[in-house]
Image (cartoon, grey):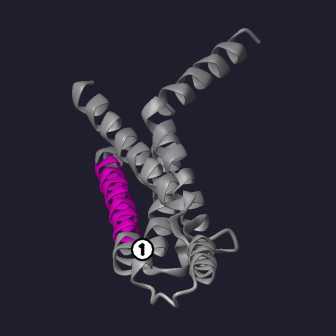
């Protein structure tokens, strides 16, 4: 009877040894990548948002997130492939994380640049003056209201994807470093 508790304690410590902080960070980053792909990447005013999965970049990060989750589960359990592949899986995780982070940065800058182009191209002072100052002021106010209504912005999904990519890449790098120093 005394052997059974010792065995279960050993198995419990073995499980925690296979599920260290780097693997937890890798898995949580994968979850964040997956959620980020489903969240809005572009917002138009307060009435329209476009999620990441409606474009190929979002689909890539969704697959990367699911892959990172699968890698974290495999490294922590070691059931599908031998333990000798943990290093290769960690490298794959690092690539997925860096790729996802790069996509989020690219999309974020693309949205920012398109906003800057729109703002730079539309000059409200170029409106034709009618000679009626009151009418001109009300038209300028109407134009500002429309610009605010249709203001394009970066959605929360881009930020979640960038953070998830960093977490996946960081967790994978920590796993690789631990494996090489051990």
Q: Nearer the viewer, residue 121 or 112?
A: 121
Quarter holding the C terminus? top left
**91 above or below 132?**
above
Prevailing SS of the magenta stretch: helix
From where the camera sits, is residue 94 visible? yes
From which residue to which does the magenta span run? 88-113
Say which quarter of the image contains residue 140: bottom right
**Residue 115, position as x, y percentages in the image:** 41, 71
- Which residue was labeled with disc 1? 57
Q: Nearer the viewer, residue 150 or 84?
A: 150
Give yes or no for residue 98 being in the magenta stretch. Answer: yes
From where the camera sits, is residue 69 visible? no
**Residue 75, position as x, y percentages in the image:** 45, 44
Q: Nearer the viewer, residue 65 or 177?
A: 65
**91 above or below 44?**
above
For residue 132, side relative to residue 98 (left or right)? right
For residue 37, side relative to residue 122 (left or right)? right
Residue visible at 41% across and 77% down in the picture: 125
Q: Nearer the viewer, residue 99 or 112?
A: 112
Residue visible at 26% across and 32% down in the picture: 177
Give yes or no for residue 100 being in the magenta stretch. Answer: yes
- Asked which secondary structure carries label 1, the reply is helix
Residue visible at 33% across and 70% down in the picture: 113
The extreme top residue here reads 2
**76 above or below 89?**
above
């Amino acid at each position: 009877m005394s052997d059974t508790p010792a065995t279960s304690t050993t198995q419990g410590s073995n499980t925690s040894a296979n599920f260290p902080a780097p693997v937890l960070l890798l898995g949580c980053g994968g979850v964040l990548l997956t959620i980020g792909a489903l969240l809005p990447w572009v917002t138009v005013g307060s009435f329209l948002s476009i999620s990441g999965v409606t474009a190929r970049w979002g689909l890539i990060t969704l697959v990367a997130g699911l892959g990172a989750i699968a890698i974290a589960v495999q490294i922590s359990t070691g059931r599908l492939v031998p333990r000798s592949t943990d290093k290769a899986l960690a490298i794959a995780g690092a690539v997925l994380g860096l790729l996802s982070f790069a996509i989020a940065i690219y999309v974020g800058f693309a949205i920012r640049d398109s906003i800057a182009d729109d703002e730079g191209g539309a000059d409200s002072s170029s409106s034709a003056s009618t000679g009626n100052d009151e009418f001109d002021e009300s038209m300028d106010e109407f134009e500002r209201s429309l610009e605010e209504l249709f203001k394009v912005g970066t959605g929360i999904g881009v930020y979640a994807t960038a953070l998830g990519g960093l977490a996946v890449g960081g967790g994978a790098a920590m796993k690789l470093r631990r494996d090489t120093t051990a």
